[in-house]
Amino acid sequence: MKYFYTFFLLIFSFTVIAQQADSTIIATTDSSNKVSFSIKLPALTQIPGAPAPFYTYLWDFGDGHFSTAESPQHLYAKADTYEVMLYAVNNYDDGRKPQRKTQKIQVNKPAPVRDNVASVAEREFFKANGVFELKYNCMAKPNDTMVLIVGWKNTEAQQQKGRLYLMLNEKLFDQTCFDTSGFRTYNSAAPLMAFTKAEEMPSLQNDLLITESGSPASNFPVSVKAAAATALFSSTISLYKNVYSTPVTETPAGDARFSFLQLHVTPEMIKDTNATLTITGVYVPEKGKPVMHKLSVPVVNSHDPNKMNIKGGRISYRFLKKHKPLNYKVRFQNNGKGPARKIALDMTMADVLNPGTIQVTDMSPFCPPCDSLAKEKRGCWELVKNEKGAVFTFHGIYLAGTGQKGVEDKDSTKGFLEFSIVTRKKLENKPFKSRTAIYFDKNEPVITNHATGRFKKSPSPIFMAGYENAFSSGATASNGIVTGVGIAPLAPYRPYLQVELYYKQGLKTTGANVIGIERPGIIRISDRQEYAYKTFDSAQTHAISQLRLVPLQLRYNIGNYFSVGAGAAVTADIGGKIESENTYHITGANGAAADPYKIKQTEDIKAFSNWRFQPFMDLQLGKVKLGPHLGFRYYHYGKNSSLGYIYAGWRF
C-alpha cells in the first residue's frame, strides 16, 4: 500500500507539473543577455474536413516590441521588470482559443546591440504605407478577445512627435461590437497609450494618405489634398461611436513604436458572420504627411484564415437598384510546410449574381494578368468565368507556408482577391449565398464559409386611403372615407405580421327605408288631438365616424405584384349621428285620409361606443413590396352585416 501511495503521488505531481507547463511562459536568458521564450499549449483537435490545425502567436514583450514566432528570442534595451504576454490563436480547431498567458521577468542588463531588438514581424509591419498601420492577431469572434496592434514609424531625419486617433464601433451597426475597456499600457520603456475621448479636431495642413488592409494590405493607396483632408477626417470620425486620441512623444529618427490594445468582442456582436467591420486609425505627425489607415475585420464563427465575405454585406432594400454592384473578398493562407506556386480560387456565386460582370479590383500577391504577358503563365493571374461563377488562378507565384522553416512573418503566408460583381436583376429581400474552393497547388481544396448577402431589417411604413361601403342596413352601417397607416417588415419574402390603424369619416348613408308598414295605432299631434293611423313609413340615415385597430394581420406576398392577407379588426364608434324619420298616414274623422304627419329624431353617437370584433380578408395588386398598390378588403361581423373597403396604398 505504501508503494501505491508513492506511485499515486508521483503521478499526481507529474500531472500538476504538466498542467503548469501548459499554462506557463518559460523564459531563459543566455550569456549575451538574450531572453528566449517558449510555452506548451494544449493539443489541437482538427475540425472534420478542415486542414491540419495550427497555432499562431503574438508575443508582447512588455517594452513596446513584439514577435509572431512560436518560440522567439528578444533583447531588452533597458534593465527592468517586464510583464510578458502571449496571445495564441487556434486555427482550424474545435476548441476554445487559449486564454492570454502572462509572465513577469527581470532583466538585469540592457542589450549590448540596440539594432537587434526589433523582430522579423516588426521589420515587416509597415507594408501598407511605411509610416502607420493597424493589424489584428485574429478575426472578430463574438464573446472572444482579439488584439489590435497599432504601429507608427518616424521616417524623418530628426525626432518626431504627433498625435494618434483611433476609431471603433461604427454607427452603421446598432450593436456595440468592441468593449474598449481593456487598453494595454506600457512602462516607461514605451509611450503611454492612455486613450481619451477626442475633443478637438486637428486642422490638417498637408495631404492625407489613406491606405487599407485586412491582412495583408491593399495595393492601392489614396491621397487626399490638404484642402479636403480636414473635412474628410471629420466626416470619418462622425461614422464612429467611440473615438480616442493620445499624444505621441518624441520618437527618434528611423524608430518604430508599437502598442497593443486588447479588445473584447461583445457577445451581442453582429450575428452575421459574413459582416466586415472597419477600425480606422489616423497618425498626425508634427511634421510631414498625416496617414489614415483602415483595417477590415471580418466577423467569424471560428478562427479560420480562409474566408469569403461581402464588403458591406448588409444591403438596404429600400434604396436597392437593379444591377447593383457588390464587392467580395476571398482571403486565404497557405498552412503547408512549403511554398505554394499555384493557387486557384473556384468561386460558386449565388444565382442572383451575374458572373459575366466580375471585375478584379485588388489582390495579394500582386501580379499582372496573364493575357498581358507574351511568355508562359508565370507570376500572373488568370480569370475564367462560367455560368455558376468563375475560377481565379495565380500562376507561378511564391506564397510561403506557415509550416515552412524560417517563416516568421505570418502575413507572408496570406493572400486575398477582391472583385466586384453585378446582380442580374433587382434582388428579393432574402439572403443569397456564395462560396469558394481554394486549391494550393495539387492539394485537396479548402472550402470557405458561405458568403451570405443579407438585407438590413427595416420597418416599412404604409399609408392607405379609400372608400368603405356598407353591405347591410343595420344601425351601425355607414359608408365613409377611410384613411389609415400601418407598419410591417420591409419587403419580406416570408409570411409576415402587419399592424394598422384607421380613421373613418362617416358619410350620410341611407339605412332602413320601409314604406307602408301596417301597424295601426294612435298618434298625438301638437294640438293634443289624437289621430288614428293604419300604416306608416320609416326612413333612417347614418353618418358615423369610427376608429379601427388591426392588431394582428397575417400577410404573404405572392411574387412582386400580389399580396393576400387575413386578420381581425377592433372597431369603435367615436362620433356622428343617426337620423330617423317616421311618416304616419292619418285617418280623418270621417274616415277619409288626412295629410301625412312626420316625426324626426336625431341620436348622437357616444365617443368610443359600440365596440365590435370584425374578421376580414384582403387582396392587394401592384408594387406590394415597396411602392403603390390597390387593395380590396372584406369585413364580416355578424349575420347580414358586412363592409367592403376599396383603397389605394403606398409602402415606403
Image (cartoon, rainbow, N blue to C red):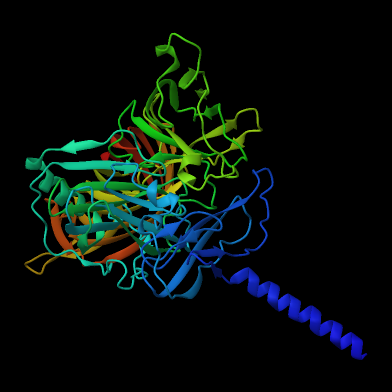
Q: Looking at this view, is 648 or 63 the one in front? A: 63
Q: Nearer the viewer, residue 465 or 562?
A: 562
In screen coordinates, is 87 left or right of 455?
right
Tell me where residue 446 appears, x and y as whole percent. Answer: 60, 37
Q: In which quadrant of the rendered view does residue 316 lie?
A: top left
Q: Is residue 380 above or below residue 521?
A: above
Q: How many marks?
A: 0
Residue at 69% from the left image edge and 47% from the top image edge: 48
Q: Is residue 578 above or below residue 379?
A: below
Q: In this view, which residue lies farthest toward the top?
A: 374
Q: Quadrant of the N terminus?
A: bottom right
Residue in the foreground of this view, choosing between 236 and 185: 185
Indicate the position of residue 529 as horizontal and vertical percent values.
11, 67
What residue is at 91 percent from the left and 87 percent from the top?
Answer: 3
Query: Residue 487, image x and y in percent?
Result: 31, 51
Is residue 377 visible in the rendered image? The answer is yes
